[in-house]
Image (spheres, rainbow, N blue to C red):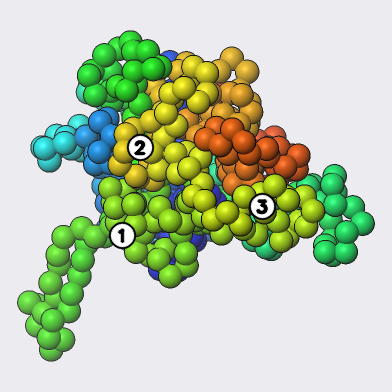
Amino acid sequence: MSSHREAPEISKDPVADSSDLYAFVSPDAPDTVTIIANYVPLQIPASGPNFFEFGDDVLYEIHIDANGDARPDITYQFRFTTELRNDKTFLYNTGPIESLDSENWNRRQFYSVTKVDSHGKQTVLAKKLPCPPCNVGKISIADYEGLAADAVHKLKSRETVFAGQRADAFFVDLGAIFDLGTLRPFQDKHLVGQKLFNYAGKAVNATDQTNVHSIAIQVPLDMVRRDGKKRVKASDAGAVIGIWTSASRRQVQVRNGDGKADDVYVGPQVQVSRLGNPLFNEVIVPMAQKDKWNSLPPSEDKRFAEFVATPELGGLLPVLYPGLFDNLAARNKLKKDRADLLAILLTGIPSGLIDGFQNNTGKVQADVLRLNTAIPPAAKPNAFGVVGGDIQGFPNGRRIADDVVSISLRAIAGVTLPLVDKEFKPDAAAALVEQGLSIKNVSSGLLKKFPYLGTPFDGFSVPS
C-alpha cells in the first residue's frame, strides 16, 4: 500500500489504517470531485467466517481545505454500526444474499454521514446507509456487482457516497522497493553485469488480488471551492483544494483498576492515522517519528520539512546505483534543500514553472493531496502524471491509475530539480527510473463510474 503499515503502532491496527487516498475531477462527471479513502488493507478474500469490516469504534474522516491554511473547511465524518441478525449461527450468511436487506445476511454494517464546517457546525446528511457485504463467493452472492451498485447512495445534499469492500488498485513491487530500493526492470535495462545485484526479474505486484474497505464520496465542485463558483480558471487560487483523510479512536484511561464502573474514563477522539500524499510517512518520515506524524494535523508538518528537503532515498540512489546518479551525488554534496520536493509535497507547485498548471496553496507547509479542480480530466491519461506531461495526474491530486511509486522515485532522483534550479541537469537514468508496473498489473480492473475501484475478489475464486 502507498501508506500501509508505515508506522509501528498503526501496523497493529489495520481497521484504522489509512492505506490509500485518491482525489480527482471525476472523468464521467467533470463538475464533481471524487475522493476515495481506503482502510483495512491487504485483505485475503477467503477470510470467513469473520469477514473484514469497518470499525464501529473508529471515526473515519475526509477533510477538505479550501483556503490553504492546512485546516479543514469541510470535513465528512463516517461512523459505522454492525448488526447481528442470528446469534445461533457461526455463518456470515445462511443462504444466498440477493439484496442489501436479505434475511440470509447475518452480519450487516450501516453508516452515517456528517458534514462539519470550518466553525465546527455539524449537519447529519444521512443515517443508517447500508454497506454491501464482503464478496463471499458466487454461490453466496450471484450478482455482487448489482449489490454494490445498490450501495451507492445519492444524498439530498448533492453528494454521492459509497462505503464497502473493493478490490485494491494500488500497484507496487514491495519486495523489491524495500530491498534497499531495488528496481528489478531498471536493473535489467541498465545494470546488466554489475556485481552489486544478485538477482533480476519481472516486477511483481504485491497487492494484487487483495481487497480493501473504501469510503468514497463525490462532491460538486462548487461545494468544495472557497468562493463556491461553478467555473474558475486553473490560475485562480480558489481552484485548488487540499485533501487528507484520518482515523480516530476514543481515548480510554483506566484510573484505579479496582473493578468499579467509574474506573474507566472515556475521553475525546484521538487521531491514530492520517494520509495526504502517497508514501509520505512511508519513505520520508524517520521511523522514530512515524507514530507522532500520524497523530498530528497537517498544519504541524513544518516539523518534518527537513526530511523532505534532504530525502534519505535521494542520498541512497547514487550509492545503490554507482555511476548512474553522479549529478545527483554532486548536488547532494552541496547540502542544499530540495526546493522542488518542498513545493511538490508541502506547499504545492506555484504558477510559472509548468505551463498551464499550478496547485499552490500558500506558505503553510502541509502534507495534503493538492488538486486544481479547474483542470479537466485528461483525454489520454499518462500514468506518470505531471512528470509525464499530464497535468491532471499526480501530484495534481491522485488518480487511481497514476504510478505514484515511479513518479516519486523520478522526482527524488532529480527530474523535477530543474523547475527550481535551471543549472541542474538530471542524470539520464533519472527519467528512466520506474518500478515496472502499471494499472494493467491490477487484475481486478476498474469501473468507469463511481466508486471506480473494481469488484472485490471473492473467497471461492481466490482462496489463498
Amino acid under disc 1 = Ser
* Image disc number at residue 295: 1
- Judging depth in this view, the residue of 138 and 276 nearest the camera is 276
> Residue at horizontal 39%, vertical 17%?
235
Q: Amino acid at mark 3?
A: Ala
Residue 306 image offset from top left, x and y in percent: 43, 56
Name the residue located 66 percent from the left edge and 52 percent from the top edge.
Answer: 330
Residue extending farthest right? 193
**Residue 147 image label:** none
- The picture quadrant where one finds residue 264 is bottom left
* Residue at disc 2, secondary structure: strand
Quarter location, residue 411: top right
Residue that appears at 40% across and 66% down: 289
Q: Nearer the viewer, mark 2 or mark 3?
A: 3
Q: Judge left or right: residue 98 versus residue 202.
A: left
Callout 3 touching callout 1 (CB < 8 Å): no
Give the residue furthest to the bottom. 258
The answer to whether 413 is drawn above or below residue 361 in the figure is below
Which residue, given by chain and number where applicable, does mark 2 sit on?
243
Crowding at dot 1, Cα within 10 Å, few <14 / some 14-19 / many 20+, comes out as some
Asked which quadrant contains residue 464, the reply is bottom right
Q: Amino acid at mark 2?
A: Ile
Residue 361 on image: x %, y %: 34, 32
CA–CA distance between discs 2 and 3? 36 Å
| Label 2: few (<14), some (14–19) or many (≥20) C-alpha neighbours in 10 Å | many
Left or right: 329 in relation to 257: right
Query: How far apart are labels 2 and 1 at the CA level?
Result: 17 Å
Residue nearest the observer in this picture, 418 or 345: 418
Residue 330's tag is: 3
